[in-house]
Image: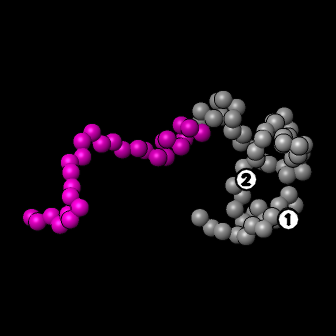
């Protein structure tokens, strides 16, 4: 068998495999246990911005990350945004 490898090749040693689904589940459970991830319905009207802080119920943060997809455009907090619907 001829191998066409103009840039060369090598032997892989000590490779591993990552079970992505298990990794995500374990990390999610760790975040829940540490109180860093909440599993609840988000109420946009509860968000209060005060200077460099954002408050939501009993949470104080510098940043707020939304992963809403197309639903984000329907929320009043983001009417100012120049975002458009992207998939992916």
Image-based side of 63 in relation to 28, left or right: right
Q: Residues within 10 Å of mark 2 (few under 14, many from 20)?
A: few
Q: Assess whether residue 73 is covered by the magenta stretch.
A: no
Disc number for residue 24: none
Residue located beneath label 2 in the image: 66
Circle 2 SS class: loop
> CB atoms at circles 1 and 2 under 8 Å apart?
no
Q: Residue at x 49, y 41 (%)?
A: 23
Q: In the displayed image of the protein, which residue is found farthest to the top? A: 34
Viewer can see residue 80: yes
Q: Nearer the viewer, residue 80 or 70?
A: 80
The image shows residue 85 at horizontal and vertical percentages of 70, 69
State the residue in front, 14 or 6: 6
Q: Quadrant of the C terminus?
A: bottom right
Which is more N-terminal, label 2 or label 1? 2
Magenta segment includes 8: yes
Q: Main secondary structure of the magenta part?
A: loop
Residue in the picture at 65% in, 34% down? 32
Label 1: element kind: loop
In the rendered view, tell whether residue 80 sits above or below residue 31.
below
- Residue where numbered disc 1 is placed: 79
Marks 1 and 2 sit apart, C-alpha to C-alpha, by: 14 Å
Label 1 environment density (alpha carbons within 10 Å; few <14, some 14–19, many ≥20): few
Q: In the figure, is residue 55 to the left or right of 65?
A: right
Occupied quadrant, residue 73: bottom right
Q: Of residues 74 and 8, which is closer to you in this image?
A: 8
Q: Residue furthest front?
A: 7
Q: The magenta stretch spans which residues?
A: 1-28
Q: Is residue 75 visible?
A: no
């Amino acid at each position: 068998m001829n191998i066409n490898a103009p840039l060369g090749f090598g032997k892989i040693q000590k490779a591993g495999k990552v079970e992505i689904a298990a990794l995500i589940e374990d990390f999610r459970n760790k975040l829940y246990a540490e109180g860093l991830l909440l599993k609840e319905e988000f109420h946009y009207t509860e968000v209060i911005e005060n200077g460099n802080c954002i408050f939501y119920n009993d949470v104080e943060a510098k940043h707020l990350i939304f992963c809403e997809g197309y639903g984000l455009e329907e929320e009043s907090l983001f009417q100012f945004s120049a975002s458009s619907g992207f998939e992916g």
